[in-house]
Image (cartoon, rainbow, N blue to C red):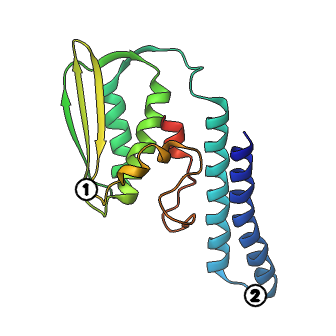
Amino acid sequence: RTTLLAGISHDLRTPLARMRVELELLRDNDNTSLIQGLENDIAEMETLIAQTLLLARGLGKEEAAPTDVCALLDDVIDGFGRSGATIELDRHGECIVRLKAESLKRVLRNLVENAVSYGDGKPVRIAYHKGAHGMTIGVSDRGPGIPVAEREAIFEPFHRLEASRNRSTGGSGLGLAIVR
């Protein structure tokens, strides 16, 4: 809990400090790029807060129900397709599965977002298979990969592969913690 709060504190202070500087500059002149910067910082904070709340609440409270996984996958793919990402879907087996739909959608969005962000602009592949012994969904990209030594650590809250929290890749370090 202490680590979580320290990470939240750090991540919230960074965009807040930028917003303070941008507001001071706005007082001196009318600059639309500064206004856009403020809007981006606010969106970054909203995302961080939403992801932190999801992590703090846990995903286990939703009830499992029969769900059309194929339609859910199509919905996730359509959302990323509208932003220009190429997502390939390989689907095998029955589509109706009893599961927690909103939790699965959240997990898939986090995984696909990471694959799109770090996949070097190449297509992302989602593979779905429903067999006699369960369901498997895999999300893969053609990016640089995750070093073997980092494969467990990436699921820890606020852990990132970059040495610093790089604003250009946008992540808060909570996405894969939520996935797990």
Q: Residue flagged by tag 1: what amino acid is it?
A: Arg
Find the residue positioned furthest to the bottom.
29
Q: Position of residue 45 (x, y in %)?
A: 67, 56
Under circle 1, the secondary element is loop
Q: Residues within 10 Å of mark 2 (few under 14, many from 20)?
A: few
Depth check, mark 2 against mark 1: the one in front is 1
Q: Position of residue 83 (x, y in %)?
A: 38, 56
Q: How many marks?
A: 2
Q: Are marks 2 and 1 in contact (CB under 8 Å)?
A: no
Q: Is residue 163 left or right of residue 117?
A: right
Under circle 2, the secondary element is loop
* x 47%, y 58%: residue: 161
**Label 2 vs 1, first from the N-terminus:** 2
Q: CA distance from mark 2 to mark 1?
A: 44 Å
Residue tagged by mark 1? 142
Q: Position of residue 3 (x, y in %)?
A: 70, 46
Residue tagged by mark 2? 29
The quadrant of the image that shows the N terminus is top right
Q: Position of residue 79 (x, y in %)?
A: 39, 46
* x 49%, y 28%: residue: 102
